[in-house]
Image (tube, helix red, strand yellow):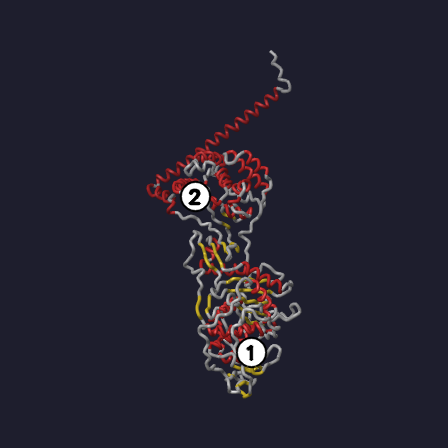
């Protein structure tokens, strides 16, 4: 019998080929099933062997395993969190740099979309199981057995949290059993919301971001509570493989992963079909790289605060301890300082300038900044770390020491003339001159201060004693080492602008020293305010009488009105002193009102480079520094009342000043005084007009002062004695 013809369009050969393909497919399926069964048996046998090993090991082995699965005996691995620094008005100054960026937030501070997305993609039965999802384990076991080793754990969120907090991430059966045990115990002890919150605060999202808040800030520059659906889905998909799904470097892969999360949310009812379609239609990831953990405002002050924190808590705690640090800095005054500098020194090749301002009543640092034209990102703190010669501003410490010894600056006279100091023939001579080589003859110490006369102050330093001058500078607030030599009275020793500001603030406070204060409060990671370190508590100590401070202030007020500091005058009672070093390498103005002290330094950070042609002039303390001080103080105090300095409770009682061999005192009615010649050790008598009367407090508003005289720089220090 002839077989029937094959169907039209198909031959027997095609049927034979189809049957052979079907047979081969069935054989491969059967082989796969057999291989899967064998691997499943290996998996079950492995677990059985592990359990038998525990039993064979006796009570000790069982106890050991139970001990390793005891939550109370385990200590969580600390990922830490960033410490943040805030200004006095609560604005953020920046985050202290750390290898891991993390900010812990409560679950209520996380977008509902982020919570739903995390549960949908990581553990869809999260709210139903007791820490271990047995259905999930069976699904994952098949994948593990097909690969021949553990590639999926079927891990729940609780298990992943345990892994992140307590145990290693090594993929072994023993670790999986321990992980499951701990997860079950953790689920019995903690609520579901707490587990989810801890997980989302610990998991790694890539790009140094640990926890959902850090991730939201890193990728979108927003808080976790403000994440939209598509943004939440993107972040929820990152923990599985942060590098593979990195949105910054692999946006296409990240987009595929985001859509996968959205499908999971749709499948498990976390979102509606409409929401899914709208989210998937958004093909732009809308990334906005954040600068929360990298941007630092006010870097000079920030570094000063960081150093104080490290000294108190240690570097590791400061970087990862989650501190909230509140400071004294006033952003408005910071802006005013920068503006004053840039308005005065506006060319790229201009020297740098640093400004520091202190509240005399508490020592609180209100401004600390510096500007180096044509250069940004300078990490060296010109205010607190740089030490430069203060020039004639140091004469204030000589004056204070002399008044504290009982010297009346109005009736004590010295000769303004070229001065040579040579205590013995074997010591090289120290020659002192004024800047412009003009001399006033016999003048009072008050007048010499207004002229900033080097020759008079060289003699006064010797008469008071360099050791007493150094001691006074330290009492007022200078912390740097000082070489006790005659030239120190003219500013030969290097100090920082912060030290000088602190010392002048002591005079503004009527003789009460306040330790410079930058930090008002530190809140620890748990929310507790640290009261043990003494943050925000002014450390004050009276170091000179209010009468001595008042007399120094009286003369420095005159200096702003008619001396070298007239460029700083801004229409209200103020006291201050200029300073210029040899060859114009450094220029200063330090001054104060009752409410605020400010010190300005101008110079080149790279070294003592002469500033002899800046905007066509040689830089002295009465030029650019005084102008910057004027502009800053005018802006800083424009709303503050104009106050007079308070009269002292304990006025100075003038007594016989034990002068050395250089000065002489004018006594009313005597008609004569003693003045030295230019050679040490010989004196002559001559007549003199009476000294100027003592000046009382200035009025609140006074007439503008005349132009400033030339500010003389100090001469070089004397050479060392010959051996």
Query: In the current view of this chain or complex, which residue is farthest to the left?
Result: 59
Which x, y percent locates residue 93? 53, 56
Query: In the current view of this chain or complex, which residue is farthest to the right?
Result: 616
Identify the residue shown where x is 41% and y is 59%.
Answer: 532
Total numbered badges shown on the rendered structure? 2
Q: Nearer the viewer, mark 2 or mark 1?
A: 1
* Mark 2 residue crowding within 10 angstroms, few (<14) / some (14–19) / many (20+): few
Query: In the current view of this chain or complex, which residue is farthest to the bottom?
Result: 685
Identify the residue shown where x is 57% and y is 77%.
Answer: 453
The residue carrying mark 2 is 194
Q: Secondary structure at mark 2?
A: helix
Can residue 467 be seen in the rendering of this structure?
A: no
Say which of 697 and 191 sits in front. Answer: 697
Residue 99 lies left or right of residue 283; in this view the side is left
Can residue 602 be seen in the rendering of this structure?
A: yes
The residue carrying mark 1 is 447
* Mark 1 residue crowding within 10 angstroms, few (<14) / some (14–19) / many (20+): many
Say which of 253 and 115 sits in front. Answer: 115
Q: Earlier in the sequence, mark 2 or mark 1?
A: 2
Identify the residue shown where x is 64% and y is 68%.
Answer: 614
Which x, y percent locates residue 388? 55, 69
Disc 2/disc 1 C-alpha distance (Å): 74 Å
397 to 78, vertically: above or below:
below
Residue 367 lies left or right of residue 74; in this view the side is right
Q: Secondary structure at mark 1?
A: helix
């Amino acid at each position: 019998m002839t077989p029937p013809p094959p169907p039209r369009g198909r031959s027997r050969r095609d049927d034979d080929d189809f049957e052979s393909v079907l047979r081969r497919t069935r054989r491969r399926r059967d082989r796969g099933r057999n291989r899967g069964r064998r691997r499943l048996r290996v998996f079950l046998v492995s677990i059985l062997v592990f359990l038998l090993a525990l039993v064979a090991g006796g009570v000790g082995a069982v106890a050991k395993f139970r001990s390793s699965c005891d939550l109370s005996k385990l200590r969580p691995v600390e990922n830490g969190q960033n410490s943040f620094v805030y200004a006095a008005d609560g604005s953020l100054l920046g985050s202290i740099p750390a290898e891991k960026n993390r900010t812990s937030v409560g679950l209520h501070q996380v977008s509902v979309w982020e919570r739903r997305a995390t549960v949908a993609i990581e553990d869809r039965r999260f709210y139903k199981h007791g820490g271990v999802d047995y259905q999930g384990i069976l699904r994952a076991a098949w994948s593990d057995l097909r690969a021949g080793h553990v590639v999926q754990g079927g891990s729940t969120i609780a298990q992943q949290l345990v892994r992140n907090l307590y145990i290693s991430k090594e993929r072994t059966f023993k670790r999986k059993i321990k992980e499951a045990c701990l997860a079950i115990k953790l689920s019995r002890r903690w609520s579901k919301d707490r587990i989810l919150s801890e997980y989302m605060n610990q998991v790694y999202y890539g790009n140094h971001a640990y926890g959902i808040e850090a991730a939201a800030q890193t990728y979108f520059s927003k808080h976790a509570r403000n994440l939209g659906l598509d943004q939440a889905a993107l972040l929820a998909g990152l923990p599985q493989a942060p590098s593979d799904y990195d949105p910054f470097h692999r946006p296409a892969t990240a987009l595929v992963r985001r859509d996968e999360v959205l499908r999971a949310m749709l499948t498990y009812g976390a979102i509606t079909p409409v929401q899914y379609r709208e989210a998937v239609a958004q093909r732009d990831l809308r990334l906005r790289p954040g600068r929360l953990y990298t941007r630092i405002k006010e870097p000079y002050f920030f570094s000063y605060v960081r150093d104080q924190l490290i000294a108190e808590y240690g570097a590791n705690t400061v970087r990862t301890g989650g501190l909230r640090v509140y400071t004294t800095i006033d952003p408005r005054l910071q802006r005013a300082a920068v503006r004053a500098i840039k308005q005065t020194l506006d060319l790229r090749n201009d020297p740098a300038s640093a400004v520091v301002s202190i509240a005399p009543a508490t020592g609180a640092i209100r401004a600390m900044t510096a500007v180096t034209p044509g250069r940004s990102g300078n990490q060296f703190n010109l205010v607190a770390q740089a030490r430069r010669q203060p020039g004639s501003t140091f004469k204030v410490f000589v004056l204070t020491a002399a008044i504290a010894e009982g010297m009346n600056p109005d009736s004590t006279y010295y000769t303004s003339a070229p001065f040579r100091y040579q205590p013995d023939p074997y010591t090289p001579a120290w020659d002192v001159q004024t800047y412009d080589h003009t001399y006033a003859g016999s003048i009072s110490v008050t007048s010499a201060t207004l002229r900033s006369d080097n020759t008079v102050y060289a003699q006064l330093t010797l008469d008071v004693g360099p050791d007493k001058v150094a001691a006074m500078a330290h009492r007022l607030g200078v912390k740097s080492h000082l070489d006790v030599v005659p030239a120190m009275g003219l500013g030969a020793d290097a100090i920082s602008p912060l030290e000088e500001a602190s010392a002048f603030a002591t005079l503004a406070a009527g003789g009460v020293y306040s330790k410079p204060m930058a930090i008002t409060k530190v809140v620890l990671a748990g929310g507790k305010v640290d009261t043990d370190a003494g943050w925000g508590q002014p450390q004050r100590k009276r170091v000179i009488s209010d009468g001595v401070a008042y007399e120094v202030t009286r003369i420095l007020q005159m200096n702003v009105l008619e001396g070298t500091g007239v460029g700083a005058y801004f229409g209200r009672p103020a006291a201050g002193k200029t300073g210029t070093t040899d060859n114009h390498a450094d220029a200063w103005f330090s001054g104060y009102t009752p409410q605020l002290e400010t010190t300005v330094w101008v110079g080149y950070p790279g070294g003592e480079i002469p500033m002899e042609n800046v905007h066509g002039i040689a830089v002295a303390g009465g030029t650019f520094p005084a102008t910057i001080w004027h502009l800053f103080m005018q802006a800083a105090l424009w709303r503050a009342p104009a106050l007079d300095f308070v009269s002292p409770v304990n006025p100075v009682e003038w007594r016989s000043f034990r002068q050395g061999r250089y000065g002489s005192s004018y006594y009313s009615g005597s008609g004569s005084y003693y003045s030295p010649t230019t050679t040490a050790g010989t004196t002559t008598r001559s007549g003199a007009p009476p000294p100027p009367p003592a000046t009382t407090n200035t009025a609140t508003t006074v007439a503008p002062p005349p132009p400033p005289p030339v500010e003389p720089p100090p001469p070089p220090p004397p050479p060392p004695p010959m051996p």
